[in-house]
Image (spheres, rainbow, N blue to C red):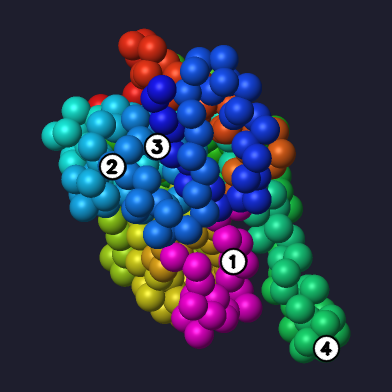
Amino acid sequence: MPKVGIYSVFNFAECDLERPIFEKAGVEMIVCQNDDDYRAMLPEIDALIVANLPVTADDISRMGRCKVIVRQGMGVDNIDVGAATKRDIAVCNIPAYNIEEVSDYALAAILTLLRHLAFYDQSIKYRKVSQYAAFPIMKRFKEVSIGILGFGKIGQLLAKKARPLFKRIMAYDPFINREKAAELGVEVTQLDDLLASSDVISLHLPYTKETHHLIDRSAFAKIKRGAYIVNAARGGIIDDSALLEAIERGDVQGAVLDMTEEMEWPKLDNPIYNNLLIINTPHCAWYTQEALDTSRIVAAEEVVDVIQGRTPVGKLN
Ligand SMILES: NC(=O)c1ccc[n+]([C@@H]2O[C@H](COP(=O)([O-])OP(=O)(O)OC[C@H]3O[C@@H](n4cnc5c(N)ncnc54)[C@H](O)[C@@H]3O)[C@@H](O)[C@H]2O)c1
């Protein structure tokens, strides 16, 4: 009987959503929640489902007969896809299960920054600033320009939701879909123009060698003074120390970061988590009951597809 290993960071050890799918397909489940059990199961599994656990070349070399690794999510930067491909192991993600959630999060972040909600909350709770003269002045939404970096599924859905609220929506993407941009009333720009003209820049691109530190010191030097940044994509696209410097200079007025360069659980002495103008969240932009359930069901279905010889929807290599 084929076996699927599930490394779960969630407390659903019974795997009630996956179980009926695997039982029907005649696949045995091994659920583990720690690294020792994970390593022990690698030689005997035919398929692996993981969320954020790094799957290294070394892990892949221990896999005796694995045919597929499914990332319960969109980005696969925690999996060594090259090493998997060399071993003829399919790597799959779960396409589009959370685009509603992440675009909602980005919109919520943009609105929160523009209305300085965190600042005003903190000014009451901790700082007791009660003079209008000391408050950061706000801009009417109808006068605000939004720049979307990465005009894929999430960037496009954000544009659709944001279009009725703001003056301009701009987008930069080297592979931009111009028809879609025109249909959504989005101006296609070059990167430098977007940086210079946006009141809020929202990132929706993958983290790759090419996008590593795309927003670095030289990008911050081009940003419109007083702009805000939202990163619901990946840490590493922004150079965190350059962001802190830009905030210190007042070039950036605030940021919402769902991820930072520190990919693992936050070390709280890192200054990126201790700046009152930065709102940090722990990679939760996608996290709704609906998205979680969909990701679990689709991951199980993709495993069954591979085991039964079909090509799964999320195959990437
Ligand atoms: N925070 C979360 O919970 C969460 C959840 C899901 C996805 N994400 C992140 O959001 C990102 C976007 O997701 P998506 O579903 O829209 O992906 P997508 O593949 O549909 O779109 C990504 C877009 O980025 C563009 N791009 C690539 N390189 C670029 C560059 N240098 N500059 C500008 N654009 C570039 C691509 O051409 C593509 O259109 C994912 O890569 C993932 O890392 C985060």
The Cα–Cα distance between marks 2 and 4, rounded to whole angstroms, is: 59 Å
- Contact (Cβ within 8 Å) of mark 3 with mark 2: no
The Cα–Cα distance between marks 1 and 3, rounded to whole angstroms, is: 31 Å
For label 1, the residue is 280
Earlier sequence position, callout 4 versus callout 1: 4
Tell me if I can see residue 180 in this picture.
no
Q: In the image, which residues are magenta?
A: 264-284
Tell me if I can see residue 273 in this picture.
yes
Q: Residue at x 44, y 65 (%)?
A: 264
Q: Residue at x 34, y 30 (%)?
A: 46
Q: Nearer the viewer, residue 92 or 256?
A: 92
The percent coordinates of residue 278 (x first, y second) are 58, 70
The Cα–Cα distance between marks 3 and 2, rounded to whole angstroms, is: 11 Å
Earlier sequence position, callout 3 versus callout 2: 2
Earlier sequence position, callout 1 versus callout 2: 2
Mark whose residue sits in front, 4 or 1: 1
Report the amino acid beneath label 1.
Asn
For label 4, the residue is 128
Q: Is residue 281 magenta?
A: yes
The percent coordinates of residue 206 (x first, y second) are 37, 43
When the figure is inspected, residue 279 is found, relative to residue 80, above or below; the finding is below
Q: Is residue 81 magenta?
A: no
**Residue 139 position by quadrant:** bottom right
For label 2, the residue is 43
Report the amino acid beneath label 3.
Leu
